[in-house]
Image: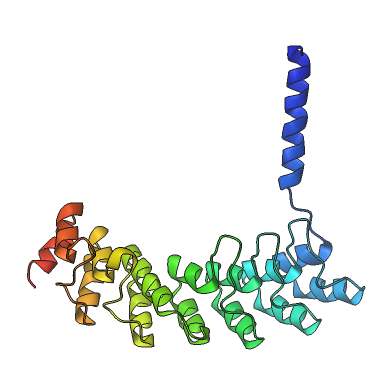
Amino acid sequence: MNHRLIIILMVCSALFLSACSREYNTELMNASKGGDDNAVQNVLARGADVNEKSNKGKTALMFAASEGHAKVLRTLIEHGAKIDIADNYGTTALIVASTAGHDEVVALLLEHNANPVARDNSGSSPLVNAVYFGHTKTVSLLLPRQKNLDKQDGEELLLLASGLGHNDIINVMIDYGISANARGLKQRTALMAAAAFDRAETAKILLARGANPDARDEDGNTALDVAKDRGSDKVLALLGQH
C-alpha cells in the first residue's frame, strides 16, 4: 500500500469518526437548549415529536434540563415529554440537571416523579453527581427521595463529600441521618478522608458533629495516622489537640 493511499484512508477514518461524534439535533432540541419557550411552543404546535431523540439518544427535555431552562421544561412536560427517558449512555434529565446543580429543574422533575435513583451506564446517579460537584441544595432535594438509601451508599457519599471538602453537604447529610462515624472502604471514616486531603475545616465540622478521632480502619490507622502519612499539616495540628 503506497503512502498516498494510507494518507487518504487516515483522512477518511478521521472524517468518519468526527461524523459519528457529532450530534444532530432537531429544531425543537435547539430551541429547548437555547431556552426559547416561544420557539418551543411554535415547533410543538407544528406537530414536532416532543420525545424525538438525537443520534446520541437525547431528547428536548434533556437539553432543557442540561441548561437549567425550567420554563421550557414545564412546556415540554405539558406536551407529553417522558420524564425518565434515557440517552445512549443511560443518562436521564434528572441526572443531567443534578450534575449541573439546576435546582429549579431538579425540583420540577421530582415533582413529576422522575426516578431519583436512576443510574447511567457508568453507575452515576443524581445524588452521587450532586455530592461530587458540591451542589448543596440539589443534595437536600434528592436525599428525601432516596427510598431505602443503602447505609453503605450513604456512608460512602459522606466520605466522598469529606474528601472533597463539601462542608455544607456534610451537614445536610448528617442532619438527614448519616452518621459522622460512617465507614467506607476498608473501614475508613469521613474524618480519615478529610485528613487524607488536609481538609481542616471539614475535620472541624466532623468532630463537632460527633466524629470519633480514635476510630481505626482495617489497617489499624486513625485519622491522625492518615494525616501524618499524607503530610496534612492543618489536620494534624487540629487532631493533635484531641
State the residue lying farthest toward the top.
Answer: 2
Using the image, determine if residue 41 lies above or below residue 52: below
Quarter of the view holding residue 78: bottom right
Query: Residue, x 82% and y 73% (percent of image)?
Result: 50
Please name whichever residue, 145 or 172, is drawn nearer the observer in this view of the structure: 145
> Picture coordinates of residue 41 (x, y %)?
83, 76
Image location (x, y in percent) of residue 108: 63, 83
Q: Residue, x 23% and y 66% (percent of image)?
A: 217
* Residue at horizontal 44 percent and vertical 70 percent from the top: 131
Name the quarter where the N terminus is drawn: top right
Looking at the rendering, in which quadrant would you find the C terminus?
A: bottom left
Task: Indicate the quadrant where residue 32 lies.
Answer: bottom right
64 left or right of 40 in image:
left
Q: In the displayed structure, does residue 184 sit left or right of residue 113?
A: left
- Outermost residue, front direction? 218
Q: Residue at x 81, y 67 (%)?
A: 28
- Asked which quadrant contains residue 58, the reply is bottom right
Can you give x and y, in whole percent of width and height, for residue 174 in the image? Answer: 33, 82
